[in-house]
Image (cartoon, coloured by chain):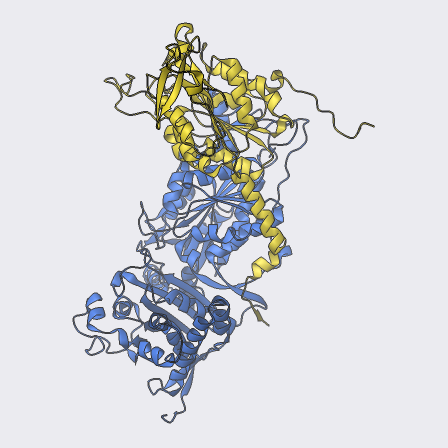
Chain colours: A blue, B yellow
Amino acid sequence: MPEVKEKKIETLSDVTVRFAGDSGDGMQLTGTQFSDTTAWVGNDLSTLPDYPAEIRAPAGTLYGVSGFQLHFSSSDVNTPGDVPDVLVAMNPAALKKNLPELRPNGTIIVNTDSFDPKNLKLANYERNPLEDDTLNGYHVHEVPITSLTKNALEDSSLSLKEVSRCKNFFALGIMYWLYNRPLEKTEEWLKIKFKNKPELAEGNIKAMKSGYNFGEITEIFTTRYKVDPANLPKGTYRNISGNEATALGFLTASVKSNLPIFLGSYPITPASDILQYLSNYKNFGVKTMQAEDEIAGITAALGAAFTGHLALTSTSGPGMALKAEAIGLAVMTELPIVIVNVQRGGPSTGLPTKTEQADLLQAFCGRNGESPVCVIAAQTPRDCFYQAIEAARIALKFMTPVILLTDGYIANGSEPWRIPDIEDLPDVHKEFRTEKEGFFPYIRDENLARPWAIPGTPGLEHRIGGLETDDITGNINYEPDNHDKMVRIRNQKIQNIANDISDLKVYGDDSGDLLVLGWGGTYGTLKDAVHLARKNGYKVSHAHLRHINPFPKNTKDVLKSYSKVLIPEINLGQLASLIKSEFLIEVEQQNLVRGLPFKTEDVLGKITELLGGNNGK
Amino acid sequence: MANNSEVQTIKLTAKDYKSDQDVRWCPGCGDYSILAQVQRTLPDIIEKEKAKVVWVSGIGCSSRIPYYINTYGFHGIHGRAPAIATGVKVANPELDVWVATGDGDLLSIGGNHFIHTCRRNVDLKILLFNNRIYGLTKGQYSPTSEKGKITKTSPYGSVDYPFNPISLAIGSGATFVARAIDVNPKHLQEMIKRAGGHKGTAFLEIYQNCNIFNDGAFSLLTDKDTKDDNILYLEHGKPMVFGKDLDKGIKLDGTKPIIVDLTTGSFTKDDILVHDEFSAEPILAMILAHITDDPAFPTPIGVFRQIQKETYDGAIASQIDFVTEKRGKGDLKKALFGANTWEVN
């Protein structure tokens, strides 16, 4: 055994790691384990999985590469990181695909065993990049991960195939050693995961420990790193993804309102998780219906809304298109329902596993007739929890459909979440109408909401439907004046929501040279970019809209307090066009529609470009 | 001693099921009879209060019916009534949920919801008003119009084969499948009652005359001179005989149905096929469904099939009970905490 040299320990404040390999290599799992342990040791973090639309694309190909990025720090983390500092590449395709994004001078750990002629060819490498100058300028650690895993498990009862599938845990072990993380969380997890196959748990644990020990003894690594715990507010934390947060937000709204959930949904990437999560909570009385199609999902939910349930439907862009007519029916019948759109790249099937913000105008206008709905957008994975509650609260209070927009980036991304006290969360409730005296289906309260009289209530029998109704009585009415009146009432009801929501908050100064205005999943990136620009002396602030229809009441005042407004969006300017038409102001736009989140440096560059001239420094 | 605490229920009448809205179908439309038979029958079917009755519909002439029945009603969008009704029933399985729909609504734009409702055996009563034409859009061929039908959109004759709705319902797993005719009120009432009493997806096809756009579509079955030779009344346990003097019958030759003459002496009633509504196998019901399409055969009217199996709404409710018993009533705090937490001090 070689003499083990004492290794240097260097303290870092901020690291971005990307695990990349074949879609069958278990990279999502490896990344998730690294995240859980990293959260547990007290770092703030943010993650971003990046996987192909094909479930198991042919092994070794470029389009079969699956990645998981993780940004962790001893201070505040708002994004999964622009550029990785470290790349773990399990095969040549993973190296080829991810190398262009690695920070210059970054660190690469490669599994040399997979750099054989066949895999090199599949990755379109003419020469072995480990043997030419491709990797000059990077810190490359060449590790024969597959054969080291086999050696470590040679006494194991596992089959050769099973042994080979433990190699991601060997790689994880190396990373745990490199960043000074404990193994126990992952050990516990493996024991539970393979409760019925203890030999698999043991094999993976052994592979992980061997990877860790390899870091310790090998001369390949001379330095290991320390990232101190972040200074997070006191409390109990967990990691949470946006889709899980959305599901838990609805569950909370259900408990708070004492209304059982009915979720009608059809599986679609990247929204299926919401249906999956909620179908676990049967003991909360949650009713989930995996419908025959998107339309059945929402129309069944509308039937349940009529019958007094907290009605939900979840989907992504193509599904939204199919649900459009039924959302119109919800507008007309004034029933409470929340429609979640986890946005993905479009149009049509588009980029199913990639993120985009291009469904905002669809949410606003994607129906026939004057068909106003409330639109809310969540901005981070954990914010999905609060916005799901907010969407349910508004739907019930105002008897209206509410569209909740999230996106693939925050839906699949995860971050630590300080679990709130249930008592501190907003009140969500709606009383059913039971009083016969003075009942009409379309009489209205002070907010213009109509009563919710559910089937089974004696004496309140009434009919609703998609035809234009008489105000008050709800009978069919095609009279010109009545239609004009009803169109305005339905619109005013949505506008009234502005009296019931919080103001648009500004990060930075209340006035200045530039306001960066965003919505949805770009929150973390814009916040980081503005933070850096302010550090550089620019008079720039950041505001992020959660309520988009209606806008918060102070939106106009906020916009008018800055010389310029920049709206970065992952679309061609959808919020920008709404802001321009609503407030009659000029705005600057930044639009990148690449299926990827913005990078902080992109936005910082734009801020600098806009303010460079007037020497904001 | 009589139990005085029991609530005395007052028997409702057809009048109680009439709403205050004017009925707006064309004069002479078959829908009037269907509405009347529904209103006459509901008091006999519904043992509960009428607040527990919900009528759901899609789009088309038939789908206006909820406005005319004084219960809870939901006039939905085209084709989606079975899905809306599924949501209503699952949300509250105690409700009696009825779907009123037409051949375009249920079998064309809503075909997917129809087959999946049957597949799931949702406890809904689906009344299909089949007039074999698009009425509300003023006369285009429908998915039950006969091939070659000349309409505004098929001036040279439609080239589409029609659906056989009974066959489709049986094939999709409906647990009660029957047929009636609008102008045969007694029989229609009986079929509505049978459908209403069934637990599971009950499908009742009602031949309904559209006197404006497809007048006489069922005249062979309704004209005095022709109806006896063209209708086969299905009755459980009875031989399948028809004709004015009940002198013709259906016999099986292998799996092939044939018509036999009972007057020649070659065949007696004992040779005739006996109807079995409750057969576990769908074969007999399917044979009967398909002779509808053969002009040589009479059209079967009555109950084709009735079987029992667990309903979708019932299964959802019992699964919730089962999981709640097994795992205990949901604890929100536990759910929010999940499996993996850590403390920051």
Residue B339 percent coordinates (x, y) = 54, 64
Q: Quadrant of residue A319?
A: top left
Compared with A481, B220 (above or below) is: above
Q: Is residue A369 visible?
A: no
Considering depth in this image, is A270 or A445 the residue closer to the camera?
A270
Q: Residue furthest top?
A: B225
Q: How many marks?
A: 0
Task: Please state, as top left, top right, bottom left or bottom right, where the N terminus of chain B lies in the image.
Answer: top right
- Please tell me which residue is depicted at 46% across the width and 10% down the height of the picture: B27
Q: Residue furthest bottom?
A: A3
Q: Residue furthest right?
A: B1
Residue A180 percent coordinates (x, y) = 45, 80
Considering depth in this image, is B97 or A223 the residue closer to the camera?
B97
- Please tell me which residue is depicted at 58% across the width and 47% down the height of the picture: B320
Residue A551 percent coordinates (x, y) = 48, 45
Compared with B90, B220 (above or below) is: above
Task: Please state, as top left, top right, bottom left or bottom right, where the C terminus of chain B lies in the image.
Answer: bottom right
Q: Residue furthest left?
A: A126
Residue A474 percent coordinates (x, y) = 55, 25
Q: Quadrant of residue A98?
A: bottom left
Compared with A278, B272 (above or below) is: above
- Please tell me which residue is depicted at 45% across the width and 72% down the height of the picture: A201
Q: Is residue A490 left or right of residue A367?
A: right
Q: Is residue B162 visible?
A: yes
Considering depth in this image, is B91 or B314 the residue closer to the camera?
B314
